[in-house]
Image (cartoon, rainbow, N blue to C red):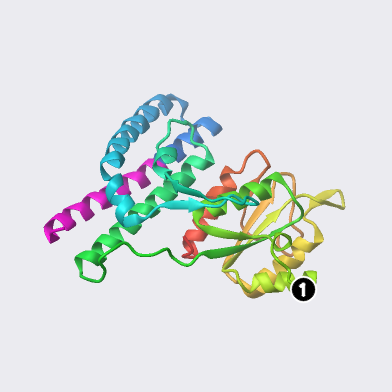
Amino acid sequence: MESDDQSKLIERLERFRRDLGAYGKLITSLRLVTEWGLHLASAGQRREEVESLRQRLIREASALKPIVDRYGGVCAFQPPLANYIIRNYDPFSGGLGTTLPPSGSVLIDLEKAMDLVDRAIGALEAEKGGLASHAPGPRPTKQAFIAHGGQSEALNKLCEFLDVLGVKPVVAERMPSEGRSVNENVEHWLAQCDCGVVLATGDDLVNGCLQPRGNVNIEIGRFQERFAGRIIFLLEEGTAFPSNVSEKVWARFSDDRMDEAFLKVVRELKAFDII
């Protein structure tokens, strides 16, 4: 490909990437309008604006997808506890779907789509500069250790969410122990991870207040030693942290509503430079 053609294509991909980001912000604001009843008089106009941008992005995605596939690679992820991998996953179809207000999965797909476009831009720039002749290989997989009180639907959803983002969820009891004790196994897998996620469910009643199970508080201490500045706190509705962690910034969740928690995870992982 000629250098001038590459430059024009890179500019077009960069505009597409910016428009995807703008669309994500628009549909997120529309979700707030719908869920919180804010500025209801403008909701119809905002829906029209979202739909107009969505249709334009669908046309652009169709035109650019062969380039993104060639230079950005493909999405693939393995659902938690599954023995199969979903290959050639198309985040553009999900991210530009018709669901309004958007579900958490739509916002996740948009993040994955923007990541593919970023990778395509990087590969094209490298090729243009003579640094590479093909798309880069997959980046090393980052891992997130999850502290939790027990098996729950929220835990399963969080694991699947991290998988979609390209971050391997590490739940100690689901990982091989190779003869190690419980504590040794936790320490072993902590050492493999890049950050910690606290999924605090209300498992113990303390002085009339639901609090996370004791093992979660212990693992928070381990996180603070190992992952200083790289800890994400998620707290179940109706649950309180003990006083020694109550000043932390957290996002609320429930088994059937994870959107706020998902958005916090994305923001924090981006800040950690993990995604």
Q: Nearer the viewer, residue 75 or 160?
A: 75
Residue shown at the point (51%, 64%) measured from the top left: 141
In this rendering, position of residue 128 left or right of residue 171: left
Is residue 15 on the magenta stretch?
yes
Q: Quadrant of residue 95?
A: top left
Q: Is residue 245 above or below residue 250?
A: below
Q: Secondary structure at mark 1?
A: loop
Q: Residues within 10 Å of mark 1 (few under 14, many from 20)?
A: few
Residue at 81 percent of width and 51 percent of height: 203
Residue occupied by mark 1: 180
At x 62% / y 50%, what residue is drawn?
82
State the image quarter where residue 231 is shown: bottom right
The reply to whether residue 243 is visible in this rendering is no
Task: Examine the residues drawn in magenta and state their main secondary structure.
Answer: helix
Residue 206: which quarter of the image? Answer: bottom right
**Image x and y of residue 31, in percent:** 49, 35
> Which part of the image, by quadrant, shows the N terminus?
bottom left
Residue 26: image location, x then y, percent: 40, 39
The segment highlighted magenta reads 1-24
Q: Is residue 257 above or below residue 183?
A: above
In the rendered structure, does residue 154 fall within the stretch colored magenta?
no
What amino acid type is highlighted by mark number 1?
Answer: Arg
Question: Is residue 167 toward the left or the right of residue 54 in the image?
Answer: right
- Residue drawn at (20%, 69%), measured in percent from left and top? 129
